Amino acid sequence: MDWNNPSNVRALVNRLRALPRENEWVEFKVNNSDPQEVGEYISALANSAALCRQETGFLLWGIRDSDRELVGTTFRPETAKHGNEDIQSWLLRLLAPHVDFSFHTTDMESKAVVVMRVDAASRLPVKFKGVEYIRIGSYKKPLSQFPEHQRRLWKNLDAYSFEEGTAAADLTVERVVQLLDYPAFFTLHKQPLPESRSAIIEALETAGLIRHTVENQWQVTNGGALLWARDLDAFPKLARKAPRVVLYEGSSRVRTQKEQTGRRGYAAGFSGLVGYIMDQLPNSEVIQGGLRMDDSQFPELVVRELVANALIHQDLTITGAGPMIELFNDRIEITNPGLPLTDPLRFIDLPPRSRNEFLGAAMRKIGVAEERGSGWDKIAFEIEFHQLPPAAVLVTGDQTRVTVLAPQPLTKLDKPGRVLAVYQHACLRYVSNQHTNNASVRERFGISDRNKAQASRIIREAIDAKLVVPYDPSAGPRAIRYIPFWADPER
C-alpha cells in the first residue's frame, strides 16, 4: 500500500470502520495519546496480529469506538513528545525487539484521523519497557496473564517465514509486471519468455513470487520482491534491505569516495552487484603469456560467494538494516544483519543451515548458491591458492562481518592471522581427505623448503590455540600430521 497517497489511507480507514467489531488487531481511539499507552498498544497489536496470523495491527485516532463515527482527533504524532523527546524515537528506544510502526494523518469529512500501523511480531513477542502485551478481545493485557495465548503466540512465531509475508498488496496484473523484473526471471531460469501476460503471471505465481487474494487482486511476497524487484524502493518495507557498497579512501572509514545502494532484487541484480564491486577493487599487475595484465587483488569467486552468503543468510526480521560491502585499499568487509546459525569455526566442514529457505532455493536454481555447504570450501581454497590472509569472521551485536585482507607478506601477518590460516588450511585438507603437515603449511604460506622451522613455529601457535591437534602424537617429526580440533577422536 502506498501510504503517501491520502486516498489509500482514507480507503483503509473505511475498511477498518466497516469491521463488525473492534478486534485483537484493530483499536479505535479519539484523543487518548498518552505515550505510555501508545507503547503498550504497539506491543499488544504486534503480538495480537502475530497470534491472529495478520501481517499488521492498527490503532486509529479520531474514530468513536461505540458507533465508528468520525469525530476527529487532536493527536498530532508529528509534534507529540515525551518530555523533550519526539514520541516516535522515545517509543523506538523502549520496544524490544524493534518492530516497524508508523503514523499517518489524513482528513476525512473535514476531521483529522491518525492511523498507526504496526508490523506483526516475527521472531519474538514484542515488549514495551520489558513487558509483553496482548489484546484479549478489545482489552489490552499483559501477555503473562494468559499462558494459553502465550503458547499459541510462540507456536505462530516459530512457524513465521518473513519470505512469505506481503511486500505489496491490492495489485492489478499490470502493476505486478511493472514491479517485478519478469524478463530477468525467465532469462536466469533459462526459459523462453511467454507470449501472453497470463502465462507470465502463472509462472510467477507457481514460483511463489506472487499470490491471489479473495478480492481478485494480487500480492507480491517479500521473497518475490527481494529476489526480482525492478526497484526495491517500490517496496517500502524492503528498501533498507538493499545491499550497499561503500568505497573508502585508504584503510579507514574517515573519507568516503563513493557509495552505491542496489536497486534491483537480489537475483535480478546479483551479477551486476558483483561486477560493480570488482570494478571498484584495486588491481595488481601480473604477467601472463609474456603480456602485462591487470588482475584484482581479491579473487572474484571469493567476493561472489561472500556476497551471496550475506544476501541469503541475513536475518530478514531485523528492521532497518541490510547487507553492506565496504571496500578499503587493504581489505574487504562484508556485513549482514543477524547471527550465524553455525559456529564460524565450523563453516568449512558442517552442512549449511538455511535461515531463508525460499531465498536460498531460488538463488540455487539460477546458479548463485549451491546449498551443499561447499561455499566456504571454495572461499578457503581460493584464498590459499592466491596466498591471501585467511577470511576472518566477527560476530558482534546482531550482525556478522567477514573480512578478507589484501595480499601481504607473511612477516606482516599477525599471530591470530597465522593461527587462523593454519586452522582453515587444516579444515580444508581434512574435508578433502588430506592431512596437514609441515610441507603443506610451507606451501600455504609460500615458505621456502629450507625454512621448515618457521612452518613448525606457526603450527605450534595453532596447537597452543587449541585449533589443531596432532593426528598421531607418537609419530616422528617427519611423519607427524595435524587435523582440526573437532576431528580429534579423543575429544
Image (cartoon, rainbow, N blue to C red):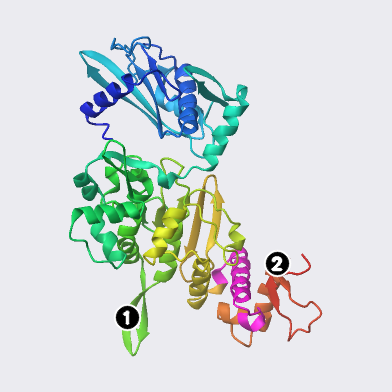
Picture quarter with the C terminus: bottom right
Q: Residue at x 51, y 18 (%)?
A: 140
Q: Quadrant of residue 488?
A: bottom right
Q: Is residue 38 above or below residue 56?
A: above
Q: Amino acid at mark 1?
A: Met
* Magenta span: 411-440
Are there few (<14), some (14-19), or many (20+) residues within 10 Å of tag 2? Answer: some
Are there few (<14), some (14-19), or many (20+) residues within 10 Å of tag 1? Answer: few
Q: Is residue 288 above or below residue 50?
A: below
Q: Nearer the viewer, residue 52 or 8?
A: 52
**Residue tagged by mark 1?**
293
Q: Is residue 246 left or right of residue 446?
A: left
Q: Nearer the viewer, residue 124 or 277?
A: 124
For marks 1 and 2, the one nearer the N-term is 1
Q: Is residue 383 above or below residue 153?
A: below
Check residue 146 in the rendering and tell me which mark sits there, or answer none.
Answer: none
Q: Amino acid at mark 2?
A: Phe
Q: Nearer the viewer, residue 80 or 165?
A: 165
Tell whether position 6 is magenta.
no
Spatial CA distance of label 1 from label 2 is 41 Å
Where residue 139 sits: x, y (%)?
Answer: 49, 16
Picture quarter with the N terminus: top left
Q: Nearer the viewer, mark 1 or mark 2?
A: 2
Q: Quadrant of residue 65?
A: top left
Q: Quadrant of residue 394?
A: bottom right
Magenta segment's dominant SS is: helix
Q: Is residue 14 left or right of residue 84?
A: left
Q: Secondary structure at mark 2?
A: helix
Q: From where the camera sits, is residue 298 visible?
A: no
Check residue 485 in the rendering and tell me which mark sits there, or answer none.
Answer: 2
